[in-house]
Image: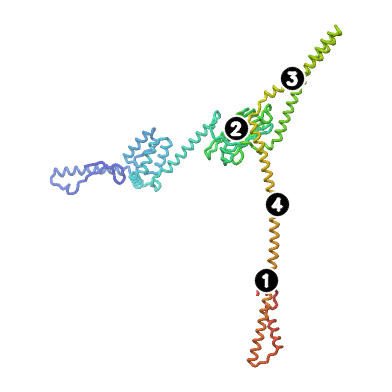
Protein backbone atom coordinates (compact mmCIF):
# COMPACT_ATOMS: atom_id res chain seq x y z
CA UNK A 1 0.00 0.00 0.00
CA UNK A 2 1.35 3.38 -1.07
CA UNK A 3 -0.15 6.70 0.07
CA UNK A 4 0.77 10.29 -0.91
CA UNK A 5 0.79 12.78 1.95
CA UNK A 6 2.74 15.71 3.38
CA UNK A 7 5.71 15.33 5.65
CA UNK A 8 5.06 16.54 9.17
CA UNK A 9 8.70 17.54 9.46
CA UNK A 10 9.28 19.57 6.32
CA UNK A 11 5.83 20.16 4.87
CA UNK A 12 6.94 18.90 1.45
CA UNK A 13 5.03 16.11 -0.37
CA UNK A 14 6.32 12.61 0.18
CA UNK A 15 5.34 8.93 -0.34
CA UNK A 16 4.38 6.70 2.59
CA UNK A 17 4.76 2.91 2.17
CA UNK A 18 3.34 0.19 4.40
CA UNK A 19 6.30 -2.24 4.64
CA UNK A 20 5.37 -5.88 5.50
CA UNK A 21 6.61 -7.11 8.85
CA UNK A 22 8.68 -10.23 9.35
CA UNK A 23 5.69 -12.32 10.34
CA UNK A 24 3.87 -11.23 7.21
CA UNK A 25 6.78 -12.50 5.09
CA UNK A 26 6.78 -15.96 6.70
CA UNK A 27 6.73 -18.46 3.77
CA UNK A 28 3.77 -20.74 4.09
CA UNK A 29 3.49 -21.60 0.47
CA UNK A 30 5.60 -21.02 -2.60
CA UNK A 31 2.94 -18.89 -4.23
CA UNK A 32 2.49 -16.75 -1.14
CA UNK A 33 6.24 -16.43 -0.83
CA UNK A 34 6.48 -15.20 -4.43
CA UNK A 35 3.74 -12.68 -3.79
CA UNK A 36 5.46 -11.51 -0.67
CA UNK A 37 8.71 -11.09 -2.54
CA UNK A 38 6.90 -9.00 -5.18
CA UNK A 39 5.36 -6.81 -2.50
CA UNK A 40 8.76 -6.36 -0.89
CA UNK A 41 10.29 -5.32 -4.20
CA UNK A 42 7.52 -2.84 -4.77
CA UNK A 43 8.03 -1.49 -1.31
CA UNK A 44 11.74 -1.03 -1.95
CA UNK A 45 10.97 0.83 -5.17
CA UNK A 46 8.53 3.14 -3.31
CA UNK A 47 11.05 3.75 -0.57
CA UNK A 48 13.58 4.80 -3.18
CA UNK A 49 11.03 7.07 -4.81
CA UNK A 50 10.24 8.66 -1.45
CA UNK A 51 13.92 9.20 -0.80
CA UNK A 52 14.26 10.83 -4.20
CA UNK A 53 11.32 13.14 -3.54
CA UNK A 54 12.18 14.00 0.05
CA UNK A 55 15.96 13.95 -0.04
CA UNK A 56 17.14 14.16 -3.63
CA UNK A 57 16.03 17.78 -3.91
CA UNK A 58 16.58 18.65 -0.26
CA UNK A 59 16.53 22.38 0.31
CA UNK A 60 14.94 23.16 -3.08
CA UNK A 61 11.48 24.29 -1.92
CA UNK A 62 9.03 25.58 -4.53
CA UNK A 63 10.06 29.12 -5.47
CA UNK A 64 7.71 32.12 -5.84
CA UNK A 65 8.63 35.66 -6.89
CA UNK A 66 6.50 38.71 -7.53
CA UNK A 67 8.65 39.66 -10.49
CA UNK A 68 7.67 36.50 -12.38
CA UNK A 69 4.02 37.61 -12.64
CA UNK A 70 2.69 40.13 -15.14
CA UNK A 71 -0.47 40.98 -13.20
CA UNK A 72 -1.79 40.88 -9.67
CA UNK A 73 -4.19 38.03 -10.44
CA UNK A 74 -1.36 35.95 -11.87
CA UNK A 75 0.82 36.68 -8.83
CA UNK A 76 -1.97 35.61 -6.44
CA UNK A 77 -2.59 32.40 -8.41
CA UNK A 78 1.12 31.54 -8.47
CA UNK A 79 1.34 32.17 -4.72
CA UNK A 80 -1.54 29.82 -3.91
CA UNK A 81 -0.10 27.07 -6.13
CA UNK A 82 3.31 27.50 -4.54
CA UNK A 83 1.77 27.22 -1.06
CA UNK A 84 0.02 24.02 -2.09
CA UNK A 85 3.36 22.70 -3.36
CA UNK A 86 5.06 23.47 -0.05
CA UNK A 87 6.15 27.11 -0.30
CA UNK A 88 6.13 28.93 3.03
CA UNK A 89 6.40 32.73 3.20
CA UNK A 90 8.99 33.54 5.82
CA UNK A 91 11.40 30.66 5.29
CA UNK A 92 13.57 33.43 3.86
CA UNK A 93 12.71 36.65 5.73
CA UNK A 94 14.65 38.94 3.39
CA UNK A 95 12.95 37.49 0.31
CA UNK A 96 9.53 37.85 1.98
CA UNK A 97 10.14 41.53 2.78
CA UNK A 98 11.38 42.23 -0.75
CA UNK A 99 8.30 40.52 -2.19
CA UNK A 100 5.98 42.59 0.00
CA UNK A 101 7.75 45.80 -0.96
CA UNK A 102 7.60 44.96 -4.67
CA UNK A 103 3.88 44.13 -4.47
CA UNK A 104 2.99 47.40 -2.71
CA UNK A 105 5.09 49.54 -5.03
CA UNK A 106 3.26 47.98 -7.98
CA UNK A 107 -0.07 48.85 -6.37
CA UNK A 108 -1.10 45.21 -5.95
CA UNK A 109 -3.03 45.79 -2.75
CA UNK A 110 -4.84 42.42 -2.62
CA UNK A 111 -1.55 40.61 -2.95
CA UNK A 112 -0.13 42.79 -0.19
CA UNK A 113 -3.08 41.92 2.06
CA UNK A 114 -2.50 38.20 1.39
CA UNK A 115 1.20 38.45 2.23
CA UNK A 116 0.47 40.33 5.48
CA UNK A 117 -2.13 37.70 6.40
CA UNK A 118 0.41 34.92 5.83
CA UNK A 119 2.97 36.78 7.97
CA UNK A 120 0.45 36.78 10.85
CA UNK A 121 -0.66 33.14 10.38
CA UNK A 122 0.94 31.26 13.29
CA UNK A 123 0.76 27.80 11.68
CA UNK A 124 2.14 29.06 8.40
CA UNK A 125 5.02 30.83 10.11
CA UNK A 126 5.78 27.80 12.27
CA UNK A 127 6.07 25.67 9.15
CA UNK A 128 8.22 28.36 7.51
CA UNK A 129 10.57 28.47 10.50
CA UNK A 130 10.87 24.67 10.53
CA UNK A 131 11.64 24.62 6.82
CA UNK A 132 14.28 27.32 7.24
CA UNK A 133 15.97 25.47 10.12
CA UNK A 134 15.92 22.08 8.39
CA UNK A 135 17.37 23.56 5.22
CA UNK A 136 20.30 24.97 7.14
CA UNK A 137 19.28 28.57 6.59
CA UNK A 138 21.20 31.41 8.13
CA UNK A 139 20.12 32.76 11.47
CA UNK A 140 18.86 36.02 9.93
CA UNK A 141 16.79 34.19 7.34
CA UNK A 142 15.14 32.01 10.01
CA UNK A 143 14.16 35.02 12.14
CA UNK A 144 10.57 35.93 12.85
CA UNK A 145 8.86 37.56 9.89
CA UNK A 146 7.69 41.14 10.57
CA UNK A 147 6.54 43.22 7.62
CA UNK A 148 5.86 46.43 9.61
CA UNK A 149 9.03 48.24 8.57
CA UNK A 150 8.59 47.22 4.92
CA UNK A 151 5.00 48.49 4.77
CA UNK A 152 5.82 51.78 6.50
CA UNK A 153 8.83 52.30 4.26
CA UNK A 154 6.75 51.83 1.13
CA UNK A 155 4.06 54.17 2.51
CA UNK A 156 6.65 56.91 3.09
CA UNK A 157 8.09 56.47 -0.38
CA UNK A 158 4.65 56.67 -1.99
CA UNK A 159 3.86 59.81 0.01
CA UNK A 160 7.10 61.44 -1.11
CA UNK A 161 6.34 60.66 -4.74
CA UNK A 162 2.80 62.01 -4.46
CA UNK A 163 4.08 65.17 -2.77
CA UNK A 164 6.57 65.61 -5.61
CA UNK A 165 3.76 65.29 -8.13
CA UNK A 166 1.79 67.95 -6.27
CA UNK A 167 4.80 70.24 -6.28
CA UNK A 168 5.12 69.78 -10.03
CA UNK A 169 1.48 70.72 -10.47
CA UNK A 170 1.86 73.81 -8.27
CA UNK A 171 5.00 74.93 -10.11
CA UNK A 172 3.07 75.27 -13.38
CA UNK A 173 3.68 78.83 -14.58
CA UNK A 174 0.29 79.02 -16.23
CA UNK A 175 -1.71 78.66 -13.02
CA UNK A 176 -1.32 79.71 -9.42
CA UNK A 177 -2.93 77.37 -6.91
CA UNK A 178 -5.05 78.65 -4.05
CA UNK A 179 -3.52 79.28 -0.67
CA UNK A 180 -3.80 81.23 2.56
CA UNK A 181 -3.92 85.01 2.14
CA UNK A 182 -1.00 86.26 4.27
CA UNK A 183 -1.19 89.37 6.39
CA UNK A 184 0.79 92.33 5.04
CA UNK A 185 1.52 96.00 5.69
CA UNK A 186 1.94 98.73 3.10
CA UNK A 187 3.34 102.24 2.91
CA UNK A 188 4.23 104.62 0.10
CA UNK A 189 6.50 107.44 -0.91
CA UNK A 190 5.88 109.70 -3.91
CA UNK A 191 7.75 107.21 -6.13
CA UNK A 192 7.56 103.78 -4.44
CA UNK A 193 5.17 101.28 -2.85
CA UNK A 194 6.53 99.31 0.13
CA UNK A 195 5.08 95.97 1.23
CA UNK A 196 6.01 93.81 4.21
CA UNK A 197 4.43 90.34 4.00
CA UNK A 198 4.14 88.04 7.01
CA UNK A 199 3.50 84.35 6.30
CA UNK A 200 0.60 84.08 8.75
CA UNK A 201 -3.14 84.59 8.44
CA UNK A 202 -3.01 87.37 11.04
CA UNK A 203 -0.46 90.06 11.81
CA UNK A 204 -0.39 89.25 15.53
CA UNK A 205 0.17 85.48 15.17
CA UNK A 206 3.55 83.73 14.83
CA UNK A 207 4.93 83.55 11.31
CA UNK A 208 5.42 80.23 9.50
CA UNK A 209 9.12 79.47 9.10
CA UNK A 210 10.84 77.67 6.24
CA UNK A 211 8.72 79.17 3.45
CA UNK A 212 10.08 79.49 -0.09
CA UNK A 213 8.61 81.83 -2.73
CA UNK A 214 8.00 79.82 -5.89
CA UNK A 215 5.98 82.35 -7.92
CA UNK A 216 6.49 86.14 -7.80
CA UNK A 217 4.85 88.08 -10.62
CA UNK A 218 4.88 91.86 -11.12
CA UNK A 219 2.90 93.42 -13.97
CA UNK A 220 1.80 96.99 -14.53
CA UNK A 221 -1.36 96.81 -12.41
CA UNK A 222 -0.94 93.62 -10.36
CA UNK A 223 1.42 91.97 -7.88
CA UNK A 224 1.34 88.25 -7.01
CA UNK A 225 3.41 86.37 -4.43
CA UNK A 226 3.07 82.62 -3.83
CA UNK A 227 5.09 80.84 -1.13
CA UNK A 228 5.19 77.15 -0.20
CA UNK A 229 5.98 76.01 3.37
CA UNK A 230 6.62 72.29 2.98
CA UNK A 231 7.57 71.68 6.61
CA UNK A 232 4.17 72.94 7.81
CA UNK A 233 2.27 71.84 4.70
CA UNK A 234 0.98 75.36 4.10
CA UNK A 235 0.80 77.54 1.02
CA UNK A 236 0.38 81.31 1.01
CA UNK A 237 -0.90 83.39 -1.92
CA UNK A 238 -0.96 87.20 -2.05
CA UNK A 239 -2.73 88.61 -5.13
CA UNK A 240 -3.02 92.43 -5.24
CA UNK A 241 -4.80 94.29 -8.08
CA UNK A 242 -3.18 97.73 -7.73
CA UNK A 243 -5.01 101.06 -7.90
CA UNK A 244 -2.53 102.52 -10.39
CA UNK A 245 0.40 101.29 -12.43
CA UNK A 246 3.91 100.32 -11.42
CA UNK A 247 7.07 99.78 -13.47
CA UNK A 248 7.98 96.03 -13.38
CA UNK A 249 11.23 96.53 -15.33
CA UNK A 250 12.64 99.29 -13.12
CA UNK A 251 15.70 98.46 -11.03
CA UNK A 252 13.94 99.60 -7.84
CA UNK A 253 11.20 96.97 -8.24
CA UNK A 254 12.61 94.21 -6.02
CA UNK A 255 11.56 91.57 -3.49
CA UNK A 256 13.38 89.38 -1.00
CA UNK A 257 12.69 86.86 1.76
CA UNK A 258 13.76 88.16 5.15
CA UNK A 259 14.16 86.39 8.47
CA UNK A 260 11.41 84.99 10.73
CA UNK A 261 8.93 84.16 7.97
CA UNK A 262 8.61 87.51 6.22
CA UNK A 263 9.04 88.97 2.73
CA UNK A 264 9.94 92.54 1.79
CA UNK A 265 8.70 94.03 -1.51
CA UNK A 266 9.46 97.38 -3.18
CA UNK A 267 7.49 98.48 -6.27
CA UNK A 268 8.51 101.48 -8.39
CA UNK A 269 5.53 103.58 -9.39
CA UNK A 270 5.06 104.30 -13.08
CA UNK A 271 6.25 107.75 -14.14
CA UNK A 272 2.72 108.93 -15.00
CA UNK A 273 1.32 107.65 -11.67
CA UNK A 274 3.87 109.11 -9.28
CA UNK A 275 2.65 110.88 -6.20
CA UNK A 276 0.63 109.70 -3.17
CA UNK A 277 -2.10 107.19 -4.05
CA UNK A 278 -5.48 107.42 -2.41
CA UNK A 279 -5.27 103.70 -1.56
CA UNK A 280 -3.33 100.60 -2.58
CA UNK A 281 -5.96 98.40 -4.24
CA UNK A 282 -8.52 98.98 -6.95
CA UNK A 283 -11.40 97.99 -4.70
CA UNK A 284 -12.58 100.52 -2.16
CA UNK A 285 -13.32 97.68 0.27
CA UNK A 286 -10.34 97.03 2.52
CA UNK A 287 -9.44 93.32 2.90
CA UNK A 288 -8.90 91.94 6.39
CA UNK A 289 -5.23 91.07 5.81
CA UNK A 290 -4.22 94.63 4.74
CA UNK A 291 -2.64 96.91 7.35
CA UNK A 292 -0.86 100.26 7.32
CA UNK A 293 2.90 100.14 7.79
CA UNK A 294 3.00 103.05 10.23
CA UNK A 295 6.74 103.19 10.76
CA UNK A 296 7.46 103.41 7.04
CA UNK A 297 4.56 105.83 6.45
CA UNK A 298 5.87 108.26 9.06
CA UNK A 299 9.32 108.04 7.50
CA UNK A 300 7.96 109.29 4.15
CA UNK A 301 5.24 111.54 5.52
CA UNK A 302 7.08 114.80 4.81
CA UNK A 303 7.93 113.72 1.25
CA UNK A 304 4.28 112.93 0.52
CA UNK A 305 3.10 116.27 1.95
CA UNK A 306 5.67 118.25 -0.06
CA UNK A 307 4.72 116.35 -3.22
CA UNK A 308 1.02 117.08 -2.65
CA UNK A 309 1.72 120.78 -2.08
CA UNK A 310 3.88 121.00 -5.20
CA UNK A 311 1.23 119.23 -7.28
CA UNK A 312 -1.50 121.55 -6.00
CA UNK A 313 0.63 124.62 -6.75
CA UNK A 314 1.41 123.38 -10.27
CA UNK A 315 -2.30 122.83 -10.88
CA UNK A 316 -3.11 126.39 -9.74
CA UNK A 317 -0.40 127.84 -11.97
CA UNK A 318 -1.74 125.91 -14.93
CA UNK A 319 -5.24 127.27 -14.33
CA UNK A 320 -3.91 130.83 -14.10
CA UNK A 321 -2.10 130.47 -17.40
CA UNK A 322 -5.25 129.11 -19.01
CA UNK A 323 -7.29 132.02 -17.70
CA UNK A 324 -4.68 134.51 -18.93
CA UNK A 325 -4.73 132.93 -22.37
CA UNK A 326 -8.52 133.17 -22.53
CA UNK A 327 -8.39 136.84 -21.49
CA UNK A 328 -5.83 137.56 -24.24
CA UNK A 329 -8.08 136.04 -26.88
CA UNK A 330 -11.03 138.20 -25.67
CA UNK A 331 -8.91 141.40 -25.84
CA UNK A 332 -7.96 140.62 -29.46
CA UNK A 333 -11.59 140.38 -30.44
CA UNK A 334 -12.28 143.65 -28.68
CA UNK A 335 -9.46 145.30 -30.67
CA UNK A 336 -10.97 144.20 -33.93
CA UNK A 337 -14.30 145.69 -32.83
CA UNK A 338 -12.51 148.93 -31.99
CA UNK A 339 -10.94 149.12 -35.44
CA UNK A 340 -14.40 148.77 -36.97
CA UNK A 341 -15.71 151.52 -34.72
CA UNK A 342 -12.78 153.82 -35.72
CA UNK A 343 -13.54 153.31 -39.42
CA UNK A 344 -17.15 154.21 -38.79
CA UNK A 345 -16.02 157.40 -36.93
CA UNK A 346 -14.21 158.62 -40.06
CA UNK A 347 -17.57 158.61 -41.79
CA UNK A 348 -19.29 160.72 -39.12
CA UNK A 349 -18.03 162.45 -35.98
CA UNK A 350 -21.27 161.87 -34.11
CA UNK A 351 -21.26 158.28 -35.11
CA UNK A 352 -17.63 158.09 -33.85
CA UNK A 353 -18.64 159.22 -30.39
CA UNK A 354 -21.41 156.66 -30.32
CA UNK A 355 -18.98 153.98 -31.54
CA UNK A 356 -16.49 154.87 -28.78
CA UNK A 357 -19.20 154.57 -26.22
CA UNK A 358 -20.29 151.28 -27.70
CA UNK A 359 -16.65 150.09 -27.60
CA UNK A 360 -16.34 150.79 -23.88
CA UNK A 361 -19.57 148.96 -23.21
CA UNK A 362 -18.39 145.98 -25.36
CA UNK A 363 -15.07 145.78 -23.48
CA UNK A 364 -16.86 145.77 -20.16
CA UNK A 365 -19.17 143.02 -21.42
CA UNK A 366 -16.17 141.01 -22.67
CA UNK A 367 -14.45 141.27 -19.27
CA UNK A 368 -17.61 140.08 -17.56
CA UNK A 369 -17.91 137.18 -19.98
CA UNK A 370 -14.25 136.21 -19.34
CA UNK A 371 -14.79 136.24 -15.59
CA UNK A 372 -17.93 134.18 -15.98
CA UNK A 373 -16.03 131.67 -18.15
CA UNK A 374 -13.21 131.40 -15.57
CA UNK A 375 -15.77 130.80 -12.84
CA UNK A 376 -17.47 128.18 -15.01
CA UNK A 377 -14.10 126.44 -15.58
CA UNK A 378 -13.43 126.34 -11.84
CA UNK A 379 -16.86 124.93 -11.21
CA UNK A 380 -16.34 122.34 -13.95
CA UNK A 381 -12.99 121.29 -12.46
CA UNK A 382 -14.58 121.02 -9.03
CA UNK A 383 -17.40 118.92 -10.47
CA UNK A 384 -14.99 116.70 -12.45
CA UNK A 385 -12.89 115.83 -9.38
CA UNK A 386 -14.62 112.99 -7.50
CA UNK A 387 -15.58 114.10 -4.02
CA UNK A 388 -14.12 112.06 -1.20
CA UNK A 389 -16.45 109.41 0.07
CA UNK A 390 -17.68 109.45 3.68
CA UNK A 391 -15.54 106.39 4.35
CA UNK A 392 -12.38 108.16 3.08
CA UNK A 393 -13.16 111.21 5.20
CA UNK A 394 -13.80 109.01 8.21
CA UNK A 395 -10.64 107.02 7.57
CA UNK A 396 -8.58 110.22 7.30
CA UNK A 397 -10.00 111.38 10.62
CA UNK A 398 -9.25 108.01 12.23
CA UNK A 399 -5.68 107.97 10.89
CA UNK A 400 -5.12 111.52 12.14
CA UNK A 401 -6.52 110.61 15.57
CA UNK A 402 -4.40 107.45 15.66
CA UNK A 403 -1.31 109.49 14.80
CA UNK A 404 -2.04 111.88 17.68
CA UNK A 405 -2.60 108.94 20.01
CA UNK A 406 0.72 107.39 18.99
CA UNK A 407 2.55 110.63 19.60
CA UNK A 408 0.81 111.01 22.96
CA UNK A 409 1.74 107.43 23.85
CA UNK A 410 5.37 108.11 22.88
CA UNK A 411 5.41 111.27 25.02
CA UNK A 412 3.88 109.37 27.92
CA UNK A 413 6.45 106.60 27.54
CA UNK A 414 9.31 109.11 27.49
CA UNK A 415 7.90 110.85 30.58
CA UNK A 416 7.54 107.52 32.38
CA UNK A 417 11.09 106.58 31.40
CA UNK A 418 12.52 109.82 32.73
CA UNK A 419 10.52 109.46 35.95
CA UNK A 420 11.74 105.88 36.38
CA UNK A 421 15.35 106.97 35.85
CA UNK A 422 15.00 109.79 38.37
CA UNK A 423 13.38 107.47 40.91
CA UNK A 424 16.16 104.92 40.42
CA UNK A 425 18.82 107.57 41.01
CA UNK A 426 17.04 108.79 44.16
CA UNK A 427 16.67 105.28 45.51
CA UNK A 428 20.34 104.56 44.83
CA UNK A 429 21.39 107.66 46.72
CA UNK A 430 19.10 106.74 49.61
CA UNK A 431 20.43 103.18 49.63
CA UNK A 432 24.02 104.46 49.69
CA UNK A 433 23.20 106.83 52.57
CA UNK A 434 21.53 104.02 54.51
CA UNK A 435 24.52 101.78 53.89
CA UNK A 436 26.89 104.51 55.14
CA UNK A 437 24.84 104.99 58.28
CA UNK A 438 24.60 101.25 58.88
CA UNK A 439 28.34 100.93 58.44
CA UNK A 440 28.99 103.68 60.99
CA UNK A 441 26.55 102.09 63.44
CA UNK A 442 28.20 98.72 63.02
CA UNK A 443 31.62 100.24 63.66
CA UNK A 444 30.31 101.97 66.78
CA UNK A 445 28.80 98.74 68.06
CA UNK A 446 32.08 96.91 67.42
CA UNK A 447 34.05 99.58 69.32
CA UNK A 448 31.63 99.39 72.23
CA UNK A 449 31.88 95.60 72.25
CA UNK A 450 35.67 95.78 72.25
CA UNK A 451 35.66 98.26 75.14
CA UNK A 452 33.25 96.09 77.13
CA UNK A 453 35.38 93.01 76.54
CA UNK A 454 38.46 94.90 77.67
CA UNK A 455 36.74 96.11 80.81
CA UNK A 456 35.51 92.60 81.56
CA UNK A 457 39.02 91.27 81.12
CA UNK A 458 40.51 93.87 83.48
CA UNK A 459 37.88 93.15 86.11
CA UNK A 460 38.49 89.41 85.83
CA UNK A 461 42.19 89.92 86.18
CA UNK A 462 41.75 92.09 89.27
CA UNK A 463 39.42 89.54 90.81
CA UNK A 464 41.88 86.74 90.10
CA UNK A 465 44.73 88.76 91.63
CA UNK A 466 42.72 89.52 94.77
CA UNK A 467 41.73 85.90 95.17
CA UNK A 468 45.33 84.80 94.63
CA UNK A 469 46.65 87.15 97.33
CA UNK A 470 43.96 86.00 99.73
CA UNK A 471 44.76 82.35 99.09
CA UNK A 472 48.50 82.98 99.55
CA UNK A 473 47.96 84.79 102.82
CA UNK A 474 45.69 82.00 104.03
CA UNK A 475 48.25 79.38 103.09
CA UNK A 476 51.03 81.35 104.84
CA UNK A 477 48.98 81.65 108.02
CA UNK A 478 48.08 77.98 107.95
CA UNK A 479 51.61 76.79 107.39
CA UNK A 480 53.24 79.33 109.70
CA UNK A 481 55.20 81.11 106.95
CA UNK A 482 56.08 84.76 106.94
CA UNK A 483 54.28 86.75 104.26
CA UNK A 484 54.25 90.53 104.12
CA UNK A 485 52.50 93.13 101.97
CA UNK A 486 55.71 93.68 99.98
CA UNK A 487 55.89 89.96 99.25
CA UNK A 488 52.27 90.11 98.09
CA UNK A 489 52.94 92.95 95.65
CA UNK A 490 56.09 91.26 94.34
CA UNK A 491 54.15 88.03 93.79
CA UNK A 492 51.43 89.86 91.85
CA UNK A 493 54.02 91.58 89.64
CA UNK A 494 55.75 88.26 88.93
CA UNK A 495 52.43 86.63 88.05
CA UNK A 496 51.57 89.49 85.67
CA UNK A 497 54.97 89.20 84.01
CA UNK A 498 54.56 85.45 83.59
CA UNK A 499 50.96 85.76 82.23
CA UNK A 500 51.07 85.74 78.38
CA UNK A 501 47.74 87.56 78.18
CA UNK A 502 49.05 90.62 79.97
CA UNK A 503 50.97 91.84 76.91
CA UNK A 504 48.17 91.37 74.33
CA UNK A 505 46.44 94.22 72.58
CA UNK A 506 42.73 95.08 72.58
CA UNK A 507 41.85 92.57 69.92
CA UNK A 508 43.81 89.76 71.63
CA UNK A 509 42.16 90.56 74.93
CA UNK A 510 38.72 90.34 73.35
CA UNK A 511 39.61 86.96 71.86
CA UNK A 512 40.91 85.78 75.23
* Residue at left offset 16%, top offset 42%: 35
Query: Which residue shows up at 78% across the image and 14% down it?
Result: 333
3D distance between C-alphas at marks 4 and 1: 40 Å
* Label 1: element kind: helix
Q: Where in the figure is residue 500, as x and y percent of width and height? A: 68, 78
Alpha carbons under labels 3 and 4: distance apart = 68 Å
Q: Cα distance, mark 2 to mark 4?
A: 46 Å
Per the image, label 3 sits on a secondary structure element best described as helix
Which of the two discs, 2 and 1, labels the residue nearer the N terminus? 2
Numbered disc 4: secondary structure? helix
Q: Quadrant of residue 493?
A: bottom right
**Sequence-first tag of 3 and 2:** 2
Q: In this figure, which residue is indicated by the disc labeled 3?
A: 372
Closer to the camera in the image, 167 or 331: 331
User: Can you tell which of label 3 and label 2 is closer to the viewer?
Assistant: 3
Residue 230: image x %, image y %? 53, 38
Whole-angstrom CA distance, mark 1 to mark 3, is: 108 Å
Q: Is residue 153 above or below residue 355?
A: below
Alpha carbon separation for disc pair 2 and 1? 82 Å
Q: Residues within 10 Å of mark 1 (few under 14, many from 20)?
A: few
Tell me: 497 left or right of 14.
right
| Mark 2 crowdedness (10 Å alpha carbons): few <14, some 14-19, many ≥20 | few
Give the residue number, with chain letter if any, for mark 4: 422
Judging from the image, what secondary structure is the residue with disc 2 in? Answer: loop
Q: Where residue 286 is drawn, which disc sits there?
A: 2
The residue depicted at 68 percent of the width and 39 percent of the height is 404
Q: Report, in whole angstroms, how far the alpha carbon at label 3 lies from the one at label 2.
A: 42 Å
Amino acid sequence: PVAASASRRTGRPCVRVAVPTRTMLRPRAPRRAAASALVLAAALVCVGLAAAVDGGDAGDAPAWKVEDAESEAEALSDLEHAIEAGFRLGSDVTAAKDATRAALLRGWWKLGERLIALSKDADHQAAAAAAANNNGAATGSAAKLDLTASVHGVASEIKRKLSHMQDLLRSDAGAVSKGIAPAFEWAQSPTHIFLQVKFAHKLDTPATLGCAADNVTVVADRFTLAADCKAKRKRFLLDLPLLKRVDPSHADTTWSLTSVGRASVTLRKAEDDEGPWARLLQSRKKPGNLHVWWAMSERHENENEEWSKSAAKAKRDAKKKEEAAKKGEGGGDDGKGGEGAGAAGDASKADGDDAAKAKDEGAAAADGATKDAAGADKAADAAAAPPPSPFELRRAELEKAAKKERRAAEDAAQTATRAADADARTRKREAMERARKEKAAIEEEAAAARAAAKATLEAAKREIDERLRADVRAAAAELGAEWTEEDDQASSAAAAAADPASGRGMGDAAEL
